[in-house]
Image: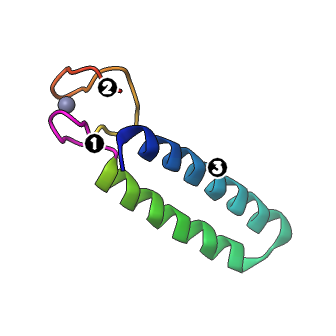
Amino acid sequence: MDLKTANRVLCILYACILISAVLAAVLQVPLLLFLALGLCAALVTVSLRFFRCPHCGQHLGRTYSAYCPHCGERLP
Ligand SMILES: [Zn+2]
């Protein structure tokens, strides 16, 4: 998975977690809370594995900028 795809997947996971957590709170359905927790685990896994600089391989942290904070190369 390349960096752009990983960024899109992370955005989708963030949105799904937010929706699941809000629905769990509003509808009082515990299953949605477990779904949100599972999505959080998937988000951490995708972030740690794929949200890396294609040049140096270092994790990019929580923010996505135009340049790698570790090696300074331009990110796609
Ligand atoms: Zn880098």
Disc 1 and disc 3: Cα gap in Å?
21 Å
The relative height of residue 24 versus residue 57 in the rendered view (above or below) is below
User: Could you give the CA–CA distance between mark 3 and mark 2, rounded to whole angstroms?
Assistant: 24 Å
Q: Observer-nearest residue: 13 or 36? A: 13
Q: Which residue is drawn at 29% across and 21% down?
A: 67
Is the residue indicated by label 2 positioned so its CB lies within 8 Å of ligand 1? yes
Kindly identify which residue carries mark 2. Answer: 75
Q: Could you tell whether 52 is left or right of 4 in the image?
A: left
State which quadrant residue 22 falls in.
bottom right
Residue 63 at what x, y percent from top left?
40, 33
Q: Does the residue labelled 3 lie within 8 Å of ligand 1?
A: no
Corner quadrant of residue 2: top left
Q: Give the range drawn in magenta.
A: 51-59
Q: Is mark 3 on a helix, strand or loop?
A: helix
Find disc 3 in the rendering and name its residue. Answer: 15
Quadrant in the picture for residue 58: top left
Q: At x 65% / y 56%, what residue is drawn?
A: 16
